[in-house]
Amino acid sequence: MKRSIYLALGLFLGSFSLLPQAFAETSTAPEQAPEQREEIVQPRAWSFLDWELIPIQAGGRVKPMRAFADEVVLHLTSRRSFEGWNPSEMLLAMVTQPRAWREKALIKIEREDVKRQLLLDVSKMRFSVAELFGNPVLLQYAQRMGDLESTMSKAPNPNADPREEELKRILDRLTVFHRLITGEAWTFLPSEAGQGWAPIARPEDSEPKSIQQILADTSAQGKIRSQFVALMGAYLGGNESVFAASSKALRASIEEEATRLEPAFAESVIHKLQAERQYHELRPFHWAWILYVVAALAFGVASWLAAGAIASGTSRAFHRAGLASLSVAIVLHVLGFVLRSIVAGRPPVTNMYESIVWVSFGAVFFALVIYAFQRFRILLGVGSVLGALGLLAADAAPTLMDPGLHPLVPVLRSNYWLTVHVLTITLGYAAFALTLGIGNVTLFKLFRGVPERSSEVTRLNQLTYRAMQFGVVLLAAGTILGGIWADYSWGRFWGWDPKEVWALIALLTYLTVLHGRYAGWVGPTGFAAWTVFCFSSVVMAWYGVNFVLGVGLHSYGFSAGGQGTVGIAVLIQLLYVAGVVAVVRRRSSASRA
Amino acid sequence: MLARWLNRTYKVLISLQLAVVLLLLLTVALIVATTLESRFDTPTAQYFVYKAGWFSVLLALLGLNILAVALSRLPWKARHVPFLSAHLGILLLLAGSWITREHGLDGMMRVAENEKQAIVEVDEPQLILQSPKETRIFPLPWTPPSVKFGGVKLPYGLAVEEYLSRAEPVFSFDPSDGPQAKPALQLKFSTKRSMGGMPAMAASQELWLWDGADDWRESGIGPARVILGGKKPEQPGPWIWISVRSNSELEFEALSMRQESSRGRVKISELGTVIDPGWKAVQIEVKKFIPKAMPRTEYVAAKLQYGAKAPPSAIRLRGPRRPDGAPGDLLWLGMGDRATFELGGDQIQISYGPKRVMVPFEIRLNRFELERYPGSMQPASFSSRVTVEGGPAATFDRLISMNEPLEWKGFTFYQSSYEEAFPRPTVSLFSVNHDPGRWVKYLGSLILVVGIIHFYIMRARRNQASRPNSSEALV
């Protein structure tokens, strides 16, 4: 399967336009001189609503064109949007003007050694399909990959050779581009339930059809094909109302044909398509992190003003602004989560992106719960910061943490266990994230000279302790529930799998600290410092096992990348702790002397 | 004196210091183990940590510490309940794990469609020695390459002299006069010129062909087929078909990628003979030609390769002493291989393979079902329709799927995997498990979690009662 794709790459050099006879612009010979090139369409400020709602089957499920476009553009260009193009329009532009897009520097290659190996200009970051296509080294590599197909794994893994992974990624992108402009990627000819939808055209279809032949085909599939051709024409033609009409018509025929073949389609899929497009349009997590940042800043200013001598009215206003911003952020956060659950039909906690979204929500939630009982305003600030950090990380690194919705591996297809095990264990992480946040605030206070035995530090310590209790119970329960699920589906309760072991390590470090605190070996400063130290074991259990170790049975979550960033973040945290502890120690020994 | 020593030991055993030290040691051990697993593989981590004696001692000490602490609070009062249950939970978990380890079974069963199976293979290699008098089993525990293998002495003067934990077969051919000896040919393929002015990546490749078995008669190099003997292939090119004319002459016929045919004869010379079918990019050189040869399998240590399954182990066996007193022959045995020796008229058979356990009934696979996500190759779910055949009274049909195991007579069958095949897979792989410690572990888990929650609730209540002076007495 995969091999044939890579081999097909070798054949694809000159003829690559979808339906070349249908348009005069694209039927010109490839040897055409540059000055004779077609005029490139610039982004049009149209509404693409109906186009974005067109159902397309890709990656094992039916999704709206908008979701497909977002995924393809992200994969192809490593960016959410490219040169100001709306992704759904960009796909249209690519398929209608393949020759122009072949020359655009779309594909990002970061590794210098790979660029050198491919004899590319090392100073450039992005390369066009045309530049990469005839590359003999890449071609040879494609062939070798075809031969090695059985031993290659598809998902990125930290143990794989990063150079090979980069080459593989380049080939994957070329394949995606190729499939887009040959029509192979446009799988929106519906079929019966459980069957794969057919693409609008296949490269192996020997004869390119003339526009008359396409229009003469009166079958449902033929109708969809001719409507797609008409839509391409309408897009190139530059008339918005014609385009809107033709995309509406195309959408209606696909929905009608899908419903005819699979009666459940109308009720069960169409509303999900709308929800999913809405989810992509709204970008709730993006706006939520911005609002969390606003809330955190407002709370910060409010507490700073309250500490100073300025009238408390201003401080209260800022606090209220913070509350408002935080509330809207939480609403958006929950809305995004709910939309995603509806679209996926499962709790969205099955990859790094989803778990970060969930854990940051959990941290905010725990902060509010404890705030409800303790009325300690610092919790609101800490919650906002944690929400902002989590969603910012998820939103800022889409190439690292895939925001796409993908079908699950068979073992994860149990909503019951997903909810019970994964939600529990990640809520545990969330509680520990809160201890990290409060711990950092405590350290900051200590650094600012608040005495260790003051009521403020004692209270902060108690809050940390409360959050840690939540964390220990949830992590212990979640790990055990994971054991029961593993017993139920893999046949053993505990198998020293790295993910299991790291959950245990995290639990052990927190238990050690709790026992040490009980024995009186860990004082207020130590306790705050240990929360940070212990959280690095959570980072390892959560991120490290998947992105650094990359071994074991939890392989469906493995990926690669970000080791440097995460490593530096952890290092900065630990250095901060060491610095504060040193300062506090020196101060207390000075006061004793 | 003894009393004082006992007292001191008891003091250490119930101390919190010991608990914290043990927890820290355990943490460090686990970090080391996961690093080993990532750096090498799972058996390495198990050998050095999880299955090592010292690790059991560490866990046992932790258990002892917890037990001693719990006993030290005698006579127990109501306020001790959460503390006791949390720690009893951990003890039960440890005990359950120990029972599983000592008395449990964890293996794999492979069943093809319309076949019956009762054998469970456990990933513990062993040697079975069968003589007319006895059958004996010698376990060969997995040993990492970095640890020197001490050798295992077997009866009848046999011995295992070498052990490769991850072995890769290397085939070669030796001249032979045996009745099955056939021509063998070693060819070297190399790229003639660089592509597009760039050095080619795969510079050369060697392969053996042998006319004695179908597996050996044909091989592939890139898109081309290479065939020795047999019938002329009828498939489209590229291929090259070589036949042996005499002990010093070969004949070939070839079809190129463009379906241009060529033929010729080559004399075998000392200094490397070249077969030239007129292909543009490839050069073929005869490295070795043996008119009458038999294959020989040897094993070398395999390198761990990312993405590939770790290859199984192999052993090197020293045969019985020759009648003239010379040491016996050396012989490689891979997983599943067997060897037969003649000793004083007796036949002694040795086989090397995984440990096998019979379940007291048979599993018949009626159909293996695989559902893929529409329009993709990604499996969505897979399941096996089986019949459990355990005599007339105990025969029934069942569906085993992911997350839906079959439990029967103390054994649990889990749908674990399958062998990929075209057009559809027909071989199902079950993970088979017998775990008498399961309920101990489940009970322990429940008690532990309830204990922790109870503990925190009680703590919160007491803190509320004794505020603002929040004393944090544990028990």
Image (tube, rainbow, N blue to C red):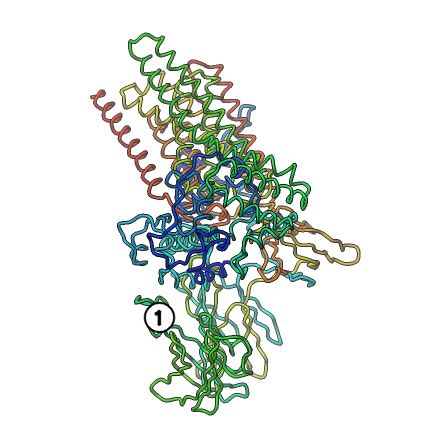
Q: Quadrant of residue B302?
A: bottom left
Q: Quadrant of residue B174?
A: bottom left
Q: Position of residue B394 (x, y in %)?
A: 76, 54
Q: How many marks?
A: 1
Determine crowd level at label 1: few under 14, some 14-19, many 20+ residues with C-alpha closer than 10 A.
few
The answer to whether residue A48 is above or below residue B366 is above
Residue at coordinates 50% horizontally, 55% vertically from top-left? A21
- Residue A477, visible in the rendered structure: no
* Residue annotated with mark 1: B203
Residue sitting farthest toward the right: B392
Q: Amino acid at mark 1?
A: Ala
Toward the viewer: B212 or B84? B212
Element type at mark 1: loop
Q: Position of residue B410 (x, y in %)?
A: 67, 50
Toward the viewer: A73 or A15? A15
Q: Chain of mark 1?
A: B
- Residue B216, visible in the rendered structure: yes
- Horizontal side, residue A451 vs residue B261: left or right: left
Q: Which quarter shows the C terminus of chain A?
A: top left
The answer to whether residue A140 is above or below residue B396 is below
Q: Position of residue A534 (x, y in %)?
A: 39, 35
Q: Position of residue A198 (x, y in %)?
A: 58, 52
Toward the viewer: A484 or B450? A484
- Horizontal side, residue A446 vs residue A5: left or right: left
Residue at coordinates 29% horizontally, 12% vertically from top-left? A308
The answer to whether residue A282 is above or below residue A178 is above
Q: Quadrant of residue A547?
A: top left
- Horizontal side, residue B404 vs residue A201: left or right: right
